[in-house]
Amino acid sequence: MVLADRGYDHDKYRRLVRELQIRPLIARRGTAHGSGLGKHRYVVEQTFALLHAFRRLRIRWEVRADIHEAFLSLACALICWRRLTSLR
């Protein structure tokens, strides 16, 4: 499932996602807010905010994708560790 805002409300994007056998959940232009997508998109936006707390990930300085992915994995592990230790 792919969640997207109204900026991606175009048949081109819906078709591309469906070709990959993924269900698109894209907000439609011209419809009132309150479709319920915000509940799901909040999780995505919150995750990006947590990842951007790591300055190295805000701007992609690494040229190699494997190094960037390693920093991304490390950041995700640190976020999970912090969440788990705060539950005690």
Image (cartoon, rainbow, N blue to C red):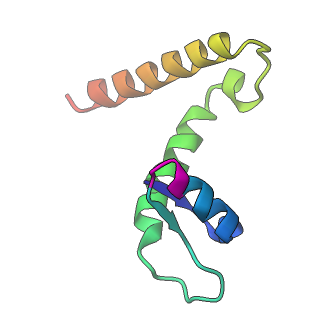
Q: In which image quadrant can residue 83 be found? A: top left
Q: Position of residue 43 (x, y in %)?
A: 44, 52
Residue drawn 71% across and 67% down? 7
Q: Provide the major secondary structure of the magenta segment.
A: loop
Left or right: 42 in relation to 64: left
Q: In which image quadrant can residue 10 be found? A: bottom right
Residue drawn 35% across and 21% down? 81
Residue drawn 54% across and 53% down? 19
Q: Nearer the viewer, residue 83 or 48?
A: 48
Residue drawn 50% across and 50% down? 44
Q: Position of residue 87 (x, y in %)?
A: 23, 33
**Quadrant occupied by the N terminus:** bottom left
Which residue is situated farthest in the front direction here? Answer: 19
Q: Position of residue 34 (x, y in %)?
A: 46, 82
Q: Nearer the viewer, residue 78 or 39?
A: 39
Above or below — where is 47 with respect to 79?
Answer: below
Left or right: 71 in relation to 46: right
Above or below — where is 23 with respect to 38?
Answer: above
The span shown in magenta is 18-22
Left or right: 6 in relation to 36: right
